[in-house]
Amino acid sequence: MEKYHIDTDRIYVIGHSMGGFISLYLTAMEEGIAGTIALVPFNFGGMQKFILTQAPALQSTFDAAIANGVQWLNTESETMLREVMERREDYDLNTKAEVLADKPIYIVTGSKDEVADETLNGKRLYQTIAAFGKGNAAYTSLPSDHSFSDRRIQLIRLIADRLDFWLS
């Protein structure tokens, strides 16, 4: 990585929604990722487990959300749903909280989010990570929707400030 002047000790990832899930999952699984910023992360495994144990009536809503989001993943919704069901334990980010607690993690949610409800996804995950007491996790809830459509400038400032804090 010397050729490209990449400091491999300072690789951070950022993702939104499914990308927030992926950024957190990768950060937990790959030692080379220093930390992550997850914007309204959707905890696929955690949500599937919640539906199966506490809210079976939400299954059709969950299925529809996945069906609406897979077209750009080059897969079929049935394939994705089957994978989430089969790997729900592995895809539950709460089960990776102890590993995530060792790295800088910043989760931003929207209190008006109708896709990745913050109390069941990002906020719950932050609380699980923070419970390990390492002090590396931070959390912000903005009064906005899933795409932060009315808070983009504020969101950009939050992200820039967090990266500046981590990298300085």
Image (cartoon, rainbow, N blue to C red):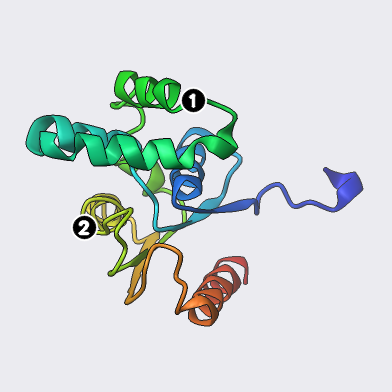
Quarter of the image for residue 79 reads top left
Percent x, y of residue 56: 12, 33
**In terms of depth relative to the viewer, which is nearer, 146 or 14?**
146
Q: Distance from label 2 to label 1 (Cα)?
A: 28 Å
Percent x, y of residue 119: 21, 57
Q: Is residue 100 left or right of residue 119?
A: right
Task: Name the residue rendered at 46%, 45% in the picture.
Answer: 18
Judged from this view, the residue extending furthest toward the right is: 3
Quarter of the image for residue 113 reads bottom left
Marks counted in the figure total 2
Percent x, y of residue 87: 34, 22
In the structure shown, which secondary structural element does the residue marked by tag 1 occupy? loop
Q: Is residue 96 visible?
A: no
Report which residue position mark 1 lands on.
76
Placement of the C terminus among the 4 image quadrants: bottom right
**In terms of depth relative to the viewer, which is nearer, 21 or 61?**
61
| Relative to 165, residue 131 above or below | above
Q: In terms of sequence position, does the residue under pointer 2 or pointer 1 come before the other?
A: 1
**In terms of depth relative to the viewer, which is nearer, 133 or 140?**
140
| Relative to 17, residue 64 above or below | above
Report which residue position mark 2 lands on.
119
Give the amino acid at mark 2.
Thr
Q: Is residue 15 visible?
A: yes
Q: Is residue 50 left or right of residue 71?
A: left
Placement of the N terminus among the 4 image quadrants: top right
Q: Is residue 74 left or right of residue 139?
A: right
